[in-house]
Image (cartoon, rainbow, N blue to C red):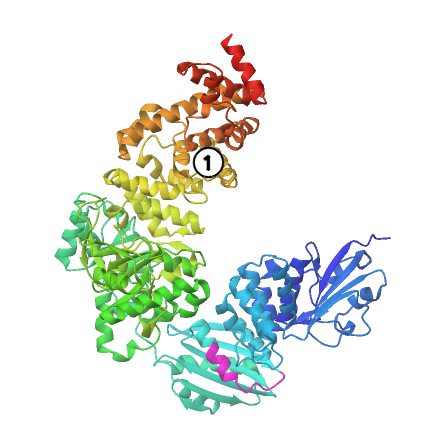
Amino acid sequence: MSEKRLTVIATHENADFDGLASMLAAKKLYPGAISIAPASQEKGVKEFVLTTAVDYFHLTKLRNIDLRAIKRVVLVDTSQLSRIGKLAEVVKDPEVEVHVYDHHLPPDPETPIDFSIIKPVGATVTILVQLLRERGIKITPEEATLMALGVYEDTGAFTFQYTTKEDLEAAGYLINCGANLNVIAELVTHQFTSTDIVLLNELIHEAQIHFIHGIPVVITKVSTDQYVGDFAVLVHRLMEIENVPVIFALVKMENRIFIIARSRLPEVNVAKILEEGFGGGGHAAAASAVAKGLTLFQVENKLLTLLPERIKPSKVVKDLMTYPVKWISPETSIKKAESILVHYDINALPILEKGKIVGIITRPVVDKALYHGLHDQPVKRFMTTEFPVLSPDASLTEIKEALLQHKQRLVPVVDKGQVVGVITRKSLLHYLLTNPSAFLGGLDLERQPRQKVIASVLNERLPKPIVNLLKRIGEISDKLGYNVYIVGGFVRDLLLRQENFDIDIVVEGDGIKLAKAMSKELGGRVHTYKKFGTAVVILPDNFRVDIATARTEFYEFPGALPTVETSSLKLDLYRRDFTINTLAIKLNPDEFGLLLDFFGGQRDLKDGIIRILHNLSFVEDPTRILRAVRFEQRFGFRIGKQTLDLMKQSLKLNPLIYVTGSRIWHELKCIFLESNPDTSLKRLHKLGALKALHPALKWSQEIENLFKEIKAVLSWFDLLYLEETYAPEWVYLLALLDKANRTEIQDYLLRLEWPESKREAFLKHRKKAVEVYHFWRRRRSIKPSEVYFTLHDLPIEFLLYLMAKLSPSQKRWLSQYFTKWRYIKPLLNGNDLKAMGLTPGPIFKTILETLLRARLDGKVKTKEDERNLVKELIR
């Protein structure tokens, strides 16, 4: 006989979002429970939730469970035996405990319930979210999204009459937990029923792309037993979700086949196609028809026969491309490339190696390389390595996407692996100007949204005082007639849901004037920097706001600090390091919360990519190499292929030697202050950037282990809550230099431009810490007094470094020192010694040190013990 030990969680057989969301929530209340897969699910639920969130459900089919081993059944979103299938027999077993969480009243009287929470709220998951919140059980953003789907679906997005304030509170809490409203909005909106969502899911699932004369046409087909009056709305929604230029949607309803067609392209007149083929009608961009006496497949086949005849072929690559191709090799010098560009009056050159295209170099990149004196460097150092290619039969739509959406000056045309021509912006522009209709359609600009209002995101994710401050900045700037924006890491981290209250303001106007106006209206003080057009406003509560005039910059030589000039917001953002740091939010009252994205920063945030803005970025500012790796490791992103190629090529020029020591130390310090600095340093080591900083900087498994020990030691020390500050960056620097000798360290600290006194102190204390380590490493015991008098003059950073190096048992010596021994003092003082008839002098120091040693080692306990010891010393 099986031992009853299992807890299972189940919902009704035809599960909806609320049922599955409630199962997910219940699993967090009953850790170790098994979630039973419903016998069936609404198709929309199955496709949109289970396919994307299967990792959160881990559903087990009932037939795979030993029913005799079940000791507890947790039912969610139902209490009816008739809706739980074979599990009903288990529930009836008197030895099985039954828990019910439901919002349907009254409960099934046939169900033997041992424990229940049944409330008249809009969704069952609302009840469970309340319990999770009360018990302090953490909900991840993904889980919050799935749970919120249940609330939104069962309350009709809070429009159904039985929606309660508890449902709204649960939704609000889930949003605070990170629920993704974009996902929810795509699935549950007020105009869609669950049937609509299922149909929309089927439309997407069944969609097939057919390229007709190079034009992408989507055909999708579904069947439904009931009539759907707003089927055209679903088709429109599908076009929005998938950015479809042309679509024909076929649906079988009530023994008839309805055809809904939409087109964004002038080449495709859907009204004529449906009129000639099926007797339908409409206009060029939107039409419909009803097909009788045909099956779905027959309608589809007839449509596929009609389309090639009725769609006008657009211009193809082979008609527009330039040939023969002028090209250069990867080893061609920058100077030679410039000569070819000028001679042939072209703006870009393909780079070929053994007949294969490996890169593209453009005139602006060549000009900038020449400006920096890189005449003799090969073009492979600065070429673009990520670019689209086209076949000779590619369509106009593909040409426009390759050149405009991918921001290319030139796109190679490749046939059977060989470059047979190139398409340039000039040739495309000439064609578009002589064929105005070709401007319309086919170019999917919506995939890179440039603007959207995120005022609600600001209100949801920022403290109210910060939001109010941003609004006041916008109002003050508006009075001055300036456009004002918050930019950089603040915006990036806002979208990544990471806390960052470092406010950087860019104003298209006089930044210093705005700072003074803010100080006048909000109080506080202003520090101005006229050379750069920047200012810092320190508000009365000491909150800091950095303000800068929108500016562009250029570099006199590689590694130099930039020279700046006043410019527009777009040029100001272009000077920044990576696309993810180029996002800006407008603060003026009429457009408060408008997110501006000129360089694809949102896309790269979504895809998790670190990407530079131009090919000489690492040459002009080599510290970006360190920042790229730091951001990559902090966010779990990856450096883009072309960015990584350019980083590796720039390292061959060793540009970091031109960077001042103070800037290098600043970037290293930022790395050391990350939560896991070892991952960044390991990555820099693999790239060869660590040794490019200085030969003394070495990486090994031993140093990696030391970094992990330091992280643990620092966490321990922080948890002591001692009122002592220390510099973590010094501790990690000691670890990074652990295998370096004194000469190497001295040389490296000189490279960092540390003043002599700081260098000497560092070397002195490190020398002592290392000596102590080697002296103690083989010892099994030690007197507290020895620990105290050995360590009491070492700064905290060096003590923590030493602690990380020692064995676990030896670490306890440092632990005792930090928490106990260093606070011990003799009970007697100088006055007591004088009272005993002693004359003040050097002997006092000797006596007091002897008393301290004795007290540390437990040889004296009381004042009387200390007096006796003093008398002994005198004798």
Left or right of 35: which side holds 615? Answer: left
Q: Within 10 Å of the Cα at label 1, are there few (<14), some (14-19), or many (20+) other Cα atoms? A: many
The reply to whether residue 125 is in sight is yes
Residue at 45 percent of width and 43 percent of height: 676
The reply to whether residue 399 is in sight is no
Left or right of 521: which side holds 364? Answer: left
Q: Which of 719 and 258 lies nearest the eye of the viewer?
A: 719
Up-down relation of residue 657 to residue 316 (above or below) = above
Left or right of 775: which side holds 590? Answer: left
Seen from this angle, which residue lies furthest top?
A: 875
Up-down relation of residue 642 to residue 92 (above or below) = above
Q: Which of 633 and 323 lies nearest the eye of the viewer?
A: 633
Q: What's under tag 1, amino acid-wise? A: Phe
- The stretch drawn in magenta includes residue 229: yes
Number of marks present in the image shown: 1
Up-down relation of residue 529 to residue 464 (above or below) = above
Q: Which of 290 and 854 lies nearest the eye of the viewer?
A: 854
**Residue topped by disc 1:** 707
Percent position of residue 755, x then y: 26, 32
Percent position of residue 199, x then y: 56, 77
Percent position of residue 484, x then y: 28, 66
Q: Quadrant of residue 106?
A: bottom right
Q: Which of 576 and 312 lies nearest the eye of the viewer?
A: 576
- The stretch drawn in magenta includes residue 168: no
Left or right of 248: which side holds 573? Answer: left
Percent position of residue 819, x then y: 53, 33
Judging from the image, what secondary structure is the residue with disc 1 in? helix
Residue at 16 percent of width and 49 percent of height: 371
For the record, the magenta segment spans: 225-237
